[in-house]
Image (cartoon, coloured by chain):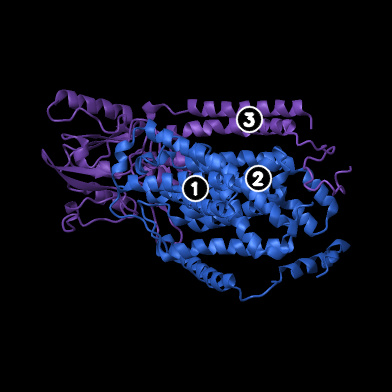
Amino acid sequence: MDRRGFLKTSLVVGAAALSSNETNAQETRDPEEFVGILVDTTRCIGCRACEVACGEEHDLLVPDVLNDGALEEHRKTSVKQWTLVNKYETEKGNVFVKRQCMHCYQAACATACPTEAMKKTEQGPVTWNGNKCIGCRYCMVSCPFEMPKFEYNEWNPKLQKCTMCFERLEEGQKPACVEACPTDTLMFGTRVKNLEISRHRIYSHPDEYVHHIYGEHEVGGTGYIYLSAVPFEQLGFRTDLGDIPYPEYTKEFLYAVPMVLFGVPAFLLGLNALADNGKPVPEGEFELEFDPENEGESDE
Amino acid sequence: MNKDVAITGSFGNFFRFVIQEMKPRGPWLTPFNIISIPVILVGIAILCFRFVYGLGSVTNLSQESPWGLWMGFDVVTGVALAGGAYVITFVVYVMKVDKYHAIVRVTVLNGLLAYCFYGAALLFDIGRPWNAANPYIGNNFGFSSVLFLICWHFLLYMVAEFVEFSPVIAEWLHWEKAKKILKKLTLGTVVLGITLSILHQSGLGALFLMAKPKIHPLWWSQFIPILFFVSSIYGGLAMIIFEGTISHRVFKLLIPPNHHHHFNDIVFGLAKGAAITMFVYYFFKALLFIHDKQWDMLNDGWGLWFLVEVLGFVLVPALMFAFGFKHRSLNIIKIAAVMALIGIILNRLNVSVIAFNWYADVHYFPTWQEIVVTLMVIFSEIWVFRWFVTRLPVFDSDH
C-alpha cells in the first residue's frame, strides 16, 4: 500500500470528521426562538385541571380529581400520566407543584438517543418518534429528571412523556394544560420572554419569591421554568444537578473518537514496523509463522 | 469422517460435508449438557413470554432502573471480559511476540462468539427490536449518541474478528487459496479491531457519563471511559487464563501435547501483564479517590462495598498475580484470575446496576427469569464454542 496516500486520506477524512463536529456545535438553534412554559407555584391552587386536560388531549388517564385523593402522596409521572400536581407542606404552608418533562434546552435524552427518536425540535419541545425508537432506554438512563417512561407491560412498548402538545403548537394553539389553567399559574411563550416575566415578578415582589428561577441555569437551562416562594429543595426539586448542559459530559469523549480512529492505527502500524523479533518477514505476508519449521507459506 | 470431500469442489459434496459437521459428536449425557439443556429450554420459553407480554412480565426493570442484569451483565460486563482478543492480537500481530501465537485462534474465537451472543442478548433487552437496524440505516443517525457509536463498533468489530478468524474456517474447509488471501488481511483487521476495541470498551463507560446524578459518586467519574478501557485489558487477560485452564482440561485430547507445557509458560506471561495493568488501574482509582476528596464517603455501607471492590478484587488479585509470577505458582495465578474476573463483574454491575439510583427506596434485583436468560446466553455460547473447537483447527498453532 502507498503509505503516503494512506496518510493523506486519513488526514483529510480525519479533518472532515473533526470539522463536521464543530459545525454541529455552531448549528445550535437560536435560543430566543425556543418556546417554554413558566410555572409560578405561588399561584397554583392544586385544582389539577392541567392533569385532566392532558389526559383528555393525549388519550391518557383522566383523573377523578374530586375523589381520588391523589394529592395525599407524592406521585411520579407514568406511562398513563404525562403531567401531575403534587402537594408539598412547606414553611409557607401548602404549595402545589406541577411536574412533567422539563424540555431541556440541551436535552440529555435527545443526545443519548442512537436513532434520533427522542428529538429536541426547533420549536423547543422534546418529542418521541416510535418509528425510529429501538427501545434501548438510554434516554431514561440519561435524563436527569427521570421523565421518559417506558411501557414495560406491552409487547410493542412506547416511551411516554410530555410533548408540550407539539401537534397543538403546530396548529398555532397553546398546550392543553396551559389553556386549562384557571389561575395563570402556567404561562406559555418563548423561554426568553418567560424569563423576563419571571425576573419582573421577583423584582416587583421581592418578599414573595425566592430569588431563583429553577430551570434558568439548571442542566444548562430548561423549557419549563419555575418560580417559588420557598427554597426549591422543599418542593422536591433536585438542586444538585449542576448548571452544565448534560451533552457536555459526553462531548469530550465523542470529540476524541476521530482522533483515536485515525491516530491509533497510525501508532499501531508504526509500532509494527519497529517491532523486530529477529525473524525475516516474508514479502507480502504480515503474519509471522509460530513454528519456523513449517515453511509451506513463508517461502513465497 | 472424511474431510477431503470438501475439496472436491462440488456444491453437493460441500453441503453434505457441512451437514455432517453439524451433527453432534461425543457422549450426550455429560454433566454440562444435563445442566445447560434445561436452562436453555426454559430461557427460550421465558423469551417467548417476554415478547408477548413485555419486558415487565419477566424482569424487575422499572422506570427508575431502566437497565438491569441483561444490559449490565450480558453487555457491559461481557464485553469487558471479551477484551482478551484485542490484547492478544496486539501482542502477536503488532508486537510480533511469537510466544502467544498458540492462543490467538482460541482467543479470537472467544471474542467473536462473545460479541455475537451479547449482540443477540441486546435484542431481548431492547423494547422494539424490529427497529434494531435503525442506527445503521437511513436518516436515523444519532451522531451525538455514545450508544450510536457503540452500535457501529459492535458491528464493525464483529466483522473484523470474523476476518481475523476466517483463515481457520478456510483451513477447515481446505480452501488453501482463500486461506492465503484471508491471512493477508490479518494485520489490517487486527489494527482496525484494536482501534475499535479501545473506543467501544471506553465507550461502554462513557454511556454512564450523563447518568452523573444517579450513580453513587464513588463510582461516577469523568474518567469512567479510561477506567473501563484499562480494566478491560486485565479483564481480558484474566478471562484467557480462566477459560484456557478449563479448555485444557475439557478439550485435553484436542490440544497438541507440547502445548500443555507451553500453555503454562503463556499463563505466566499473561499473569505478569495482568499484574502490571491492575496496578496501573488501582493507582488510577486511588488517584481519583484522593483527588475527589471522597474520604467521608467510606463511612457507610457504600464505602465498605467500594473498598471490597477496589481492595479485595483489584489490589489483592494484582498482588497475587505478581506473587504467582515471581514464585512460579500456577495455582495462585488461577485464583487471582478468578478474583480479577469477579472484580470486573463487581465494577461493571456497580456502575450500571447496583450503585445506579443508589438513593432509591426500592432497589432493583433481578428476577429468576433474568438470571436464567443470562445463563442461557452463556451456555449457548459455550455450546457453539464447543462445536467450533471440536471441528475447526482452533487449538492448532502451526498454521
Mark 2 or 1: the one toward you = 1
Residue topped by disc 1: B317
Q: Which amino acid lies under the numbered mark 1 shown in the image of this protein? A: Pro
Q: Are marks 2 and 1 in contact (CB under 8 Å)?
A: no
Q: Secondary structure at mark 1?
A: helix
Chain A is which colour? Answer: purple
Q: The disc numbered 3 marks a residue on which chain?
A: A
Which numbered disc covers residue B88? 2
| Residue A61 position in % (x across, y down) | 29, 56
The answer to whether residue A100 shows anywhere in this view is yes
Is residue B224 among what the camera can see? no
Front-most of B70 and B171?
Answer: B171
Looking at the rendering, which quadrant does residue B370 occupy?
A: bottom left
- The kind of residue tagged 3 is Gly
Question: Residue A224's quadrant in the figure?
Answer: top left
Mark 2 vs mark 3, CA separation in Å: 20 Å
In this view, the residue farthest toward the top is A203
Element carrying mark 3? helix
The amino acid at mark 2 is: Ile
Tell me the blue chain.
B
Numbered mark located on residue A263 in the image: 3
SS at badge 2: helix
